[in-house]
């Protein structure tokens, strides 16, 4: 398993260095290109999973009146309430353990972790990119950029409730800003590119939802 992992990371590093050569030695563009390429390649799968989640959410919202009636009817019989609730979900095709969604998530994890590991192996020492003087060092402006991208992603989330909207918008952005500002800029660029693709995906999902 260790050899397989090292092989994956090594291959990703080799691709990254090849891309850097194509960009005249610019490792920053190589990181962005590779990160975006992987995310766009996986986008058909992630879009499908996101659409399934949106559909499930809409079904759950439509079932709320029936769920409230079940809670009132079986208030003194929790076992019966549980059975009837799951029966209602089953009849309406609601699945809380979607194997396809889990499979897509598991597929992305080793690829993304491999990219992260490849970038973190001191590739950026002494490498400049735009305003960043050293890709191996943290950069507060890059952290701010990733925080803003996180804010945009969260703002487009269809499941965001008005009661917790401010907290759910601000808190992830601040946490991301703090984390990225303390890690190497190479990882920050990877994070920024990944968040940018996620933002594009969120916009696509919103557009597809409005067309229905």
Image (cartoon, grey):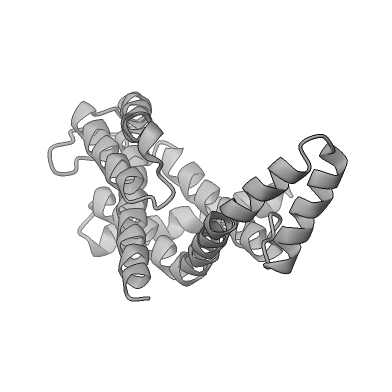
Q: Residue furthest left?
A: 131
User: Which residue is rendered at x = 42% and y = 61% of the image?
Assistant: 39
* Residue 196 position within the rendered picture, expressed as x and y whole percent measured from the top left: 30, 53
Q: Measured along the vertical axis of the image, is residue 208 above or below residue 30?
A: below
Count all numbered tags in the image, as a single digit: 0
At 43% across and 62% down in the image, what residue appears?
A: 38
- Comparing 209 with 28, the one in front is 209
From this view, report whether residue 120 is shown above or below residue 181: below
The image shows residue 7, relative to residue 210, as above or below, that is above
User: Which residue is farthest bottom?
Assistant: 212
In percent of width and height, residue 91 lies at 73, 67
Residue 81 visible within the image: yes
Q: Quadrant of the C terminus?
A: bottom left
Q: Could you tell me which residue is drawn at 14 percent across and 43 percent down?
A: 130
Residue 161 position within the rendered picture, expressed as x and y whole percent measured from the top left? 41, 41
Residue 135 makes an appearance in the image: no
Question: Is 205 on the left or on the right of 81, as rendered?
Answer: left
Q: Quadrant of residue 126?
A: top left
Q: What x and y, as percent, mark residue 121? A: 45, 38
Residue at the far front in the pictured view? 73
Q: Quadrant of residue 29?
A: bottom left
**For residue 195, side relative to residue 109 (left or right):** left
Q: Is residue 139 left or right of residue 110?
A: left
């Amino acid at each position: 398993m260790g050899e397989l992992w090292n092989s994956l990371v090594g291959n990703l590093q080799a691709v990254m260095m090849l891309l850097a050569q194509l960009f005249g030695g610019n490792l920053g563009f190589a990181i962005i290109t590779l990160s975006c390429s992987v995310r766009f390649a996986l986008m058909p799968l992630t879009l499908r999973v996101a659409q399934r989640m949106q559909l499930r959410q809409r079904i759950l919202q439509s079932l709320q009146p029936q769920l409230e009636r079940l809670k009132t009817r079986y208030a003194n019989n929790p076992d019966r309430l549980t059975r009837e609730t799951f029966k209602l979900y089953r009849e309406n095709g609601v699945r809380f353990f979607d194997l396809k969604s889990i499979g897509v998530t598991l597929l992305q994890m080793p690829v993304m972790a491999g990219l992260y590991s490849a970038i973190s192996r001191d590739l950026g020492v002494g490498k400049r990119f735009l305003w960043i003087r050293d890709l191996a060092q943290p950069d507060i402006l890059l952290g701010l950029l990733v925080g803003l991208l996180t804010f945009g992603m969260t703002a487009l989330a269809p499941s965001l409730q008005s009661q917790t909207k401010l907290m759910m918008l601000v808190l992830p952005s601040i946490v991301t800003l703090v984390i990225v500002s303390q890690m190497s800029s190479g990882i920050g660029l990877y994070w920024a590119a990944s968040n940018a693709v996620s933002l594009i995906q969120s916009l696509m999902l919103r557009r597809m939802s409005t067309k229905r």
